[in-house]
Amino acid sequence: MIDYTLLFQNTKTMSVLVAEDYQPLREDLSEILTDLFDQVAAATNGEEALILYQKKLEKEGRGFDLLITDIQMPLMNGIVLCEKVREMNPDQEVVVLSAHTDSNYLLQLIECGISKFLSKPIDQQALMKALFHVSSRQKTEKSESDEKRVIELGDGFVWNSEKGELLDGYDPVELTRYEYLLFLFLTEKNGQICTNEAIIDYFYQYNIELHEKSIRNFIFKLRKKLPEDLIQSIYGMGYKLNISY
């Protein structure tokens, strides 16, 4: 028996898209999921589901956290839907609903990397277990990902790479565009030495021409805004961040 409270803790901030052409099942699923998920959308076929997914991706910069799809649907079946969604998001979590007659599609579904496979008629406990499995994995991966995105620089300074935000405690540190790009490059190199040539090439991607004297000037200004000794000069080679990842 799945603990509903624990399940809700996982799913309450998540979004789910249901693709199912059989109206009674689609409505039942939507009703169950609405009590658990922050956002629920439903489609009557794969084509409609794909449009909903694309619109959310374009509007919010991310698709649905979970896709629940039938296999045999008009206009576009669930396999093609999975393939197209995974082209946009290779890590997409997918739960497939299937009748016994859909077993011929099993190999294709495995190749699509589906998360769970539920047989029709859908058992509610089996559905809850599948949701708990998928949401728990996402929560763990998100926690690990968040830890990687937030880098402690020392003296209370923190760099959040996802937001592109440098904080001194709770206060944001203002960086100029050039300072920001230079600091971003140093953090992306994970403590490796960044030569002047590599820095110049990096800025050139943004149509900015730098000279070694300019780099020294930006390093000087950055150091005034960061913990002491965070940026190390490696004689005759370049610069690196003195932090533990």
Image (tube, rainbow, N blue to C red):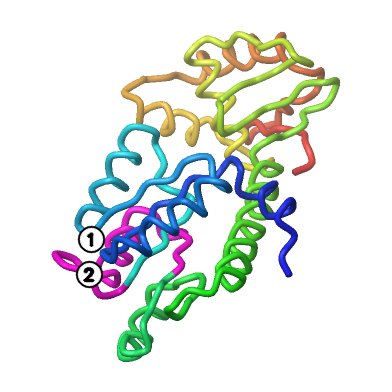
**Which quadrant of the view contains residue 128?**
bottom right
Rendered position, 87 above or below 73: above
Q: Residue furthest left?
A: 75
Which secondary structure lies at badge 2? loop
- Could you say where residue 35 lies in the image, as x and y percent from the top left? 56, 46
C-beta proximity under 8 Å, tags 1 and 2: yes
Question: What stretch of residues is rendered in magenta?
Answer: 71-95
Rendered position, 31 above or below 121: above
Residue lying at 83% horizontally and 26% vertically, measured from the top left: 154
List the residue tagged with mark 1. 45
List the residue tagged with mark 2. 73
Which secondary structure lies at badge 1? loop
Q: Identify the amino acid type marked 1.
A: Asn
Residue lying at 36% horizontally and 59% vertically, measured from the top left: 26
Q: Residue furthest front?
A: 24
Report crowding for label 2: few under 14, some 14 to 19, many 20 or more residues within 10 A (C-alpha): some
- Could you say where residue 219 lies in the image, as x and y percent from the top left? 62, 17
Residue lying at 63% horizontally and 36% vertically, measured from the top left: 237
- Could you say where residue 203 lies in the image, as x and y percent from the top left? 42, 26
In the rendered image, which quarter contains the C terminus?
A: top right
Q: Is residue 1 magenta?
A: no
Of residues 189 and 109, the one drawn nearer to the viewer in this rendering: 109
Q: Is residue 23 left or right of residue 113?
A: left
